[in-house]
Image (cartoon, rainbow, N blue to C red):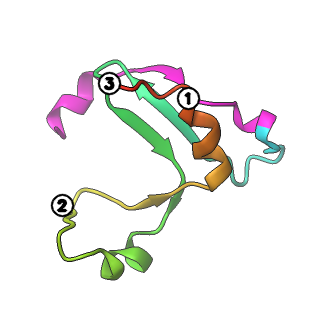
Amino acid sequence: MRNELSSARITRRLGDAPRARGCQTGESCPDVFELSDGNFAVIGIEATALLDPQLPPDAARADFERIVVIDRDTLIRAKRDIPDA
C-alpha cells in the first residue's frame, strides 16, 4: 500500500471544515479526507508512542505506520460522508 500512495490524491473532505468546528488558530485542526484510490487520510495528533503499547494482541502496526488521534466531534461529523460500502 505504501507505494500506491504516491498516486493517491485528496478528492474530498469528510464532514465539516475545521473552521466550522471551531478551529480558528490552526493549532489543532483534525480533518478526514477521502483519497482518489478509495482510502482515507486523517490529520490528527500523533500518538504512536503513547498508544502502541496499549494495542490489543491481535492488532499490528508496521514500522512506517503511525497511530493518529482525532477528536470525537470530527469523526461524528465525518460519518455522514463515509460511504456504506
Q: Which residue is mark 1?
A: 14
Mark 3 vs 2, N-terminal side: 2
Q: Residue at x 46, y 68 (%)?
A: 47
Residue 82, percent from left and from top: 47, 28
The answer for how far apart the CA atoms under marks 2 and 1 are is 26 Å
What's under tag 3, amino acid-wise? Ala
Disc 3 crowd, CA 10 A, few/some/many (<14, 14-19, 20+): few
Residue 7, percent from left and from top: 26, 21
Residue 17 lies within the magenta run: yes
The answer for how far apart the CA atoms under marks 3 and 2 are is 26 Å
- SS assignment at label 3: loop
Q: Which residues are magenta?
A: 1-20
Q: Residue at x 84, y 43 (%)?
A: 24
Quadrant of the drawing holding the N terminus: top left
Mark 2 vs 1, N-terminal side: 1
Mark 1 vs 3, N-terminal side: 1
Residue 40: name its quadrant.
top left
Q: Which residue is mark 2?
A: 62
